Image (cartoon, helix red, strand yellow):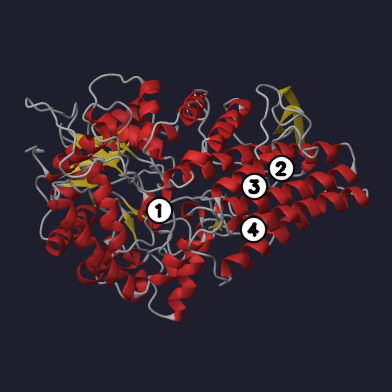
Amino acid sequence: MQLIEGTTGVDIVAGLHWYLKHWCGSHISWDKTGGSQLFSVPNVGFLPRVDDAGISVQRPVPWNYYQNAVTSSYSFAWWDWKRWEKEIDWMALQGVNLPLAFTGQEAIWQKVFKEKFNMSISNLNYFFGGPAFLAWSRMGNLHGWGGPLPQSWFDQQLILQKKILARMYELGMTPVLPAFSGNVPAALKSIFPSAKITRLGNWFSVKNDLKWCCTYLLDATDPLFVEIGRAFVEQQLQEYGRTSHIYNCDTFDENTPPIDDPEYISSLGAAIFKGMQSGDNDAVWLMQGWLFSYDPFWRPPQMKALLHSVPVGKLVVLDLFAEVGVGMSMEGIEQNPIVYDLMSEMAFQHKKINVKTWIDLYSTRRYGRQVPLIQEGWNVLYHTIYNCTDGAYDKNRDIIVAFPDVDPSLLSVEQEHPHPYGKPFSRAIIKEITDSFDRPHLWYSTSEVIYALELFISSGSELSKSSTYRYDLVDLTRQVLAKYANQLFYNVIEAYQSHDVHEVTVLSQRFLDLVEDLDLLLACHDGFLLGPWLDSAIQLAQNEEQKRQFEWNARTQITMWFDNTDEEASLLRDYGNKYWSGLLHDYYGPRAAIYFKYLKESLEKDEDFNLKEWRREWIKLTNDWQSRRNIFPVVSRGDALNTSRWLFNKYLNLSNPETLESRSGRLSVKFQ
């Protein structure tokens, strides 16, 4: 008989995953990224045997951290217990033992502020954000946006949090609870007029509307700070019955302290920790470390003052040094399964691994069989897409999902080097400082990635029944065509600057056709659908008013959120963009069509591009879309392989006369 032993439930479950992965050739990923491949696991009685001496796998560092303060909104916002139960199981399989547990904290705050600090429900209505924006109201970036929260939300989320914590504790995890950061409701100022409360500066607001922006921060040196901090920790202990003693607090996450005096910074840090410790004598403070690189305020004296304000062993900083743990702190999940597969394994690796060998085995595990063509394809991706070494801080700024709000005459389209889509590769830069345009990030050879796509398509006859293969095929086709769309846009701008109305018309229509075609591709897999995001929001609502509010929250977060005027878009537009079927057809395509309409009008009337009217019409489209209630599919439809093959032949094949001239590098193959 074979046994898996470990010191905690997490270790035992991770040991099972290690066995399934390395002895049975299986693969486990999220349902949206293709799910799990367990067909390779032999039947009971035929399982591979481990040597009698056994295999010992130990962690090089004790902690395996998971989540980010904003993942709770970008990914978890609408989860019910069924989805959370799956996620906690996934965490355990990956060896995660230090997850954030932020769900339901608004219910704790409601009780604390009402019962201990004499606040009414109306005082709190515009303190908490809406369901899709709680991450930012928790961090003190905004208040009230998307709210107010119905009482049923507080109650449901508290029940859910208790289930989450019970399961995490059952598995031997150390859930990280929230702590008081100093973010307080406006009403506290009138209830405690002598308290040191500062109104913070504007955080990405267009209008500086005090209804949403410029939150209130209680000075950590004020005695009330420790009192509130203690009350919050004690209320959690009362509700949950236990604690793991680790608390997260990010007072300065995108909020700069009002004074840079090191002594003041030290007093802030000491007071924040005292607020936790007064409620839990064994408290340990866990904080994100990215503020030290994000905000120039944090110079060595200020950093030292903060880090030395807490007793040794009582502060854990999430940085890149991996001295006490490793982890994953992505802002959103359910994508790039290869990254999570490798990263979670690193929590148990003591030596540098051979990534090439690992990826060969990964493709076999992911699809349940060894296919040389697809192994070669993954090797290409390893050296291209998964090899970004230019140091750029990359967000998804592809033109389709992050359309530039810029006067086309201010774009300088530069020719750089031969491009696989035909013409020399073009990139756009702004001639002078005007409206922001983060150009798409391209760090790899597109011709090589197109070759990888050919290899993936060629493997379809063997793998088309595999959900993991279909997910990867859709994702890779999407990636290739997204970069193709960027090039099309640059070509439109070149034609505009050459005053070629016909070419602008032809190329802009091709761009719009591509958006529609991509929508059809994305519809072929459940992992790329808008419908489930909206439907899960609606399912949590208890009446029609809540359905409308929750759906508005869901639609707004993925398009343009925080305030805007009729002619000035939100600064947070497209930050949460998604390549989701339904979103491309219903929003991204129509938005691009408006821009192209004004391009053509500018040339036909021989007038400057009407940036003001473009913005007005785009913002109206956005606001109208956010308030709509049309329904989108929640189940995929269409054949991923046939659709990918068709799109390849339409947009990337040399023999197609509509394809942009010829590609350099490897020759294209026409798939029949």
**Of label 4 and label 2, which has the lower sequence position?**
4
Q: Is residue 556 left or right of residue 130?
A: right
Up/down of 188 relative to 603, above or below = below
The foreground one among 54 and 265 is 54
Q: Amino acid at mark 1?
A: Ser
Whole-percent x, y for residue 584 in the image:
62, 55
Label ID, residue 585: 4
Whole-percent x, y for residue 36 in the image:
34, 46
**Of label 3 and label 4, which has the lower sequence position?**
3
Alpha-carbon distance for marks 4 and 2?
19 Å
Alpha-carbon distance for marks 2 and 1?
34 Å
Q: Are marks 4 and 2 in contact (CB under 8 Å)?
A: no
Label ID, residue 75: 1
Helix or strand or loop: what does disc 1 sit on?
loop
Q: Amino acid at mark 3?
A: Ile
Helix or strand or loop: what does disc 2 sit on?
helix
**Of label 1 and label 3, which has the lower sequence position?**
1
Alpha-carbon distance for marks 1 and 3?
21 Å
Q: Please tell me which residue is depicted at 16% across the width and 58% down the height of the picture.
A: 166
Whole-percent x, y for residue 206 in the image:
59, 55
**Of label 2 and label 1, which has the lower sequence position?**
1
Alpha-carbon distance for marks 1 and 4?
22 Å
Of badges 4 and 2, nearer the viewer stands: 2
Alpha-carbon distance for marks 2 and 3?
18 Å
Whole-percent x, y for residue 251 in the image:
33, 46
Alpha-carbon distance for marks 3 and 4?
11 Å
Of badges 3 and 4, nearer the viewer stands: 4
The residue to which callout 2 is attached is 650
Local packing at callout 3 (Cα closer than 10 Å; few below 14, some 14-19, many 20+) is many
Label ID, residue 400: 3
The C terminus lies in which quarter of the figure? top right
Q: Are marks 2 and 3 in contact (CB under 8 Å)?
A: no
